[in-house]
Amino acid sequence: MTPPPDLAARQRALVAALVAGGEVPAGFDAAAVRATTAALRRKRAGEVAARWPFLAASYGDAWVPTFAAWAASRPPNGSLRDGWDFALAAGDTLPGLAREELAAREAEYAYDGESAPVPRRRGLLSRLRRR
Amino acid sequence: MTTSAFGVGIGWRPEIAGYVAGLPGLRFTEVVAESLHTHAPLPDGLAELVGRGVRVIPHGVKLSLGGAEPIRDERAAHLHRCAELLGAPLVSEHIAFVRAGDLEAGHLLPVPRTREALDAIVANVRRAQAALGGVQLALEPIAALFDWPDPELTEGEFLTEILDRTGCALLLDIANVYANARNRGEPPAALLDELPLERIAYVHVAGGVQQGGYYHDTHTDPTPPEVLALVKELCARTVPPALMLERDGDYPPAATLTAELDAIAAAAGWPAIT
Amino acid sequence: MTTSIVAGPGDTWGIPGPQFLWLYFGLAAVAIISVLIWRRGYTAGPSLRSARDLTATQAALINGDRRLAVYSSLAALRAAGCVESDKRGYLHQAAHLPTGASELDRAVYAVTRNGITTTGVQTHHSVREVLDRTEAELARDGWILDDQARRAVRTGALVVFAVLAIGIARLFAGISNDKPVGNLVLLLIPIGIAAFALLSVRRVSGAGKRILAKMRRDAQHLSPSQKPSWTTYGPQAAALSVGLFGAGAFWLADPAFAQQAELQRNIAQTGLSSSSYSGSSCSSSSSCSSSSSSCSSGSSCGGGSSCGGGGCGG
């Protein structure tokens, strides 16, 4: 049974409103959708913090608002990529501890910013080379 | 008076695995399916529970059964492999969608209560059931701060029809029932009465917090007394096979978790497992 | 008897070359093997059967060093919420010490009364006194080898050096007799390497290594790869987590404090890279549909929730 295109488009519009900064679709309780958006961002910040503990810790209490502001119009890509993209976007303003964590991740995965990070080969030689 | 098959349980999380393993009366737990790598052995703590004869149910969160697009075969197959690894006769998932087109929501979102959406869900559930082989599927209705406009069915009608047409069991989340009723301004027990309680496979209990004008079912807060009262109401109507505390983060001291598990057991009128 | 230089070559020392090589090889083998057997017996340590588990402080001293022992006490104090660090890295008391604190915990807590850095704690005389005593007990019981014991073990290497000396003497004698010494040199190299290798002695006894391994197996849930909740398990478990799994466990559980208190990171890591602590990584991209191991269940913000995004390692 083919899914009705109508439903798919409407679902996409809702998701866009919640995670990609899109407009709240007609007929929805806008306040409730906005409350959901805010809570979603907090939760996403928590998930990225779990995956990137040093990154989050280096921002301290400012982590959730800082990450939420950056993520406002960017749909989630999974906590590994989200944290990575955030760290790359921070550039020179990235605190030292976070920079170390980013370096460790870059040693572990190859990431071009476009597709999912790929684990690097963990051979002895490549590990020695990275030392 | 029948007794519950498995009693009170708690969700397995690596952060509190030692606490879960130490519960003397534990016979039931649940693990998030997406956190298991099926091409690697089970985490030690989990393997030990399985070896001890504790029932472990894999709980999926990313299948997106409520989506307009068909579910991905790999995800359904993964659920099946989890059930095999754990020796589980049942897996559970949600009546919700988590992605649409190229966008991931990263979250469980409500579906419209229309016949169109109903047909789409039933089609997806049937796909999942095909991938699961003989393993039973239980569906969990979620909590949401908002509903879709122009619903054609009530929550109870919508759920009952899905379960009737697919033969699935119900994973009743008491905290979700409470959250939805509270946010809509309706009495929670009334919503409870609309649901097909005889199809319950097991029950979730969880905590939340009132914030910004809404009750948020966070799973990182203590279970409020109102939810415990609803547990009591439920157990007056039927005997669920298991009542499981879902805690996902901000884990409190062991004594606090023990008190919460004891409170759930007391509300149900069941023996404590601690 | 006169040695004739002109009339026909005589064997060095009266033993023909090949025969000497065989004898020498046999002698060296016997010497090295005996020394190894003797060392193993000497450094074996106590039997595990009758031994109780170690305390967190003891585990930290065996697994790492005094710094790790202090860190393990700090972990207990942090988990109990009774110590804090200010921005300059000075530690202060924040609440009363809970019951069940170990001797080192009490000593570390006491010295933070007027504010002190982590390095200051490590070198404070009352803390050093507890550490000295604990280390001495561990050495006495045989879990670690103190300097005296290690010196004794090192003397075993003397035997092999003596064998090496014989070979070198033969080498010079052979050279001055114009004898071929190539094979002898080839034999002397591994003997020399063995002699120098025998000079290094581990600090931890065989039993010490085994009891640490046993305790790590029993306390799997405290391994950093599980991201254990110190709040749930309590202060003594936090101390054990650091003692058994190294300073990295502290950094993962409480990175803000670890950074402010300027704890070192690379003490006694148990072979896991720090990046593999947080979340699991997926090696096969096609069939894996999982994300980080701390994926939460369907909690809602009002809606249900799921782990962020799809794909491995997400």
Image: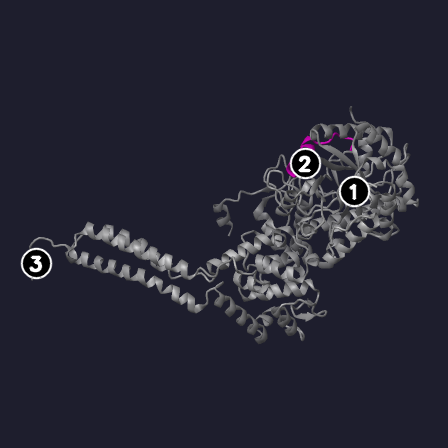
Q: Position of residue B80 (x, y in %)?
A: 68, 33
Instruction: Check if mark 1 and mark 2 are on a common chain.
Output: yes
Query: Which chain does the numbered disc 3 sit on?
Result: C
Q: Quadrant of residue B92?
A: top right
Asked if both marks, 2 and 3, belong to the same chain, the answer given is no
In percent of width and height, residue B226 lies at: 87, 50
Q: Position of residue C70 (x, y in %)?
A: 59, 66
Magenta segment: B67-86
Indicate the quadrant where residue B256 lies: bottom right
Does any portion of residue C86 appear in the rendered image? no
Looking at the image, tell me whether mark 1 or mark 2 is earlier in sequence order: 1
Which residue, given by chain and number where applicable, does mark 2 sit on?
Answer: B83
Q: Amino acid at mark 2?
A: Ala
Is the residue under label 3 in contact with that under label 2 (CB below 8 Å)?
no
Describe the element under mark 2 as helix, strand or loop. helix
Q: How many marks?
A: 3
- Circle 1 packing at 10 Å, graded few (<14), some (14-19), many (20+), is some
Amino acid type assigned to the residue bearing label 1 in the image = Ser
Determine crowd level at label 2: few under 14, some 14-19, many 20+ residues with C-alpha closer than 10 A.
many
Residue type at tag 3? Ser
The residue labelled by disc 3 is C4
> How far is mark 1 from mark 3, CA to CA?
104 Å
> Disc 1 versus disc 2: distance between alpha carbons?
22 Å
Assign a secondary structure to mark 1.
loop
- At horizontal 44% and vertical 61% (from top left) the residue drawn is C202
Q: Chain of mark 2?
A: B
Image quarter (top left, top right, bottom left or bottom right) of the N terminus of chain B:
top right
B84 part of magenta stretch? yes
Residue C30: quarter of image: bottom left
